[in-house]
Amino acid sequence: MKKLDFLKVSFIIRTDRIQNNESPVYMMLFLDGRRAYIATGQKVSLKNWDEKNGRFSGNNSNINAMNEFIDRMKYDVIRIYNELKSKDSDITVDVLRQRLKGDGGKEIKTA
């Protein structure tokens, strides 16, 4: 019987890398007990981050655009995951990270 894979996608900020009162936002992938972090390229001030929900907080056009951007990233990862799963490919967080960053369609198997 094939085991069930469970992909968890969330967004976090790196408080250890605060510069000018802004922290970088990272996407965290969790699959089969392994984690991968992907920089989103976005920064947020601590007062504009909802830690509980992993989203930008507030209600203006800039914050709404940032939330749409991270939602798009999440949907892209889920789409890539489902494509690989439909091909019965080995799926790891490293493969997902490489495919999301556009490092080719080559499937790289990692342990």
Image (cartoon, grey):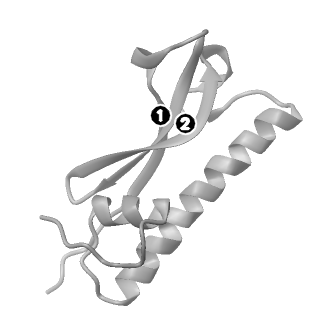
> Which amino acid, by three-letter code, is at mark 2?
Gly
What residue is disc 1 on?
12
Please tell me whether residue 8 is drawn above or below residue 63 in the rendered image. Answer: below
Whether residue 106 is situated above or below residue 5 in the rendered picture: below
Return the x and y of residue 55 as percentages of the image width and height: 62, 36
Mark 2 lies on residue: 54
Residue at 64 percent across and 58 percent down: it is 72
Q: Secondary structure at mark 2?
A: loop
The mark closer to the camera, 2 or 1, is: 1
Q: Residue at x 77, y 34 (%)?
A: 63
Q: Is residue 40 above or below residue 18?
A: below
18 left or right, relative to 48: left
Quarter of the figure that contains the C terminus: bottom left
The three-letter amino acid code for the residue at tag 1 is Ile
For the image shown, how many numbered marks are present on the structure? Answer: 2
Q: Is residue 21 above or below residue 105?
A: above
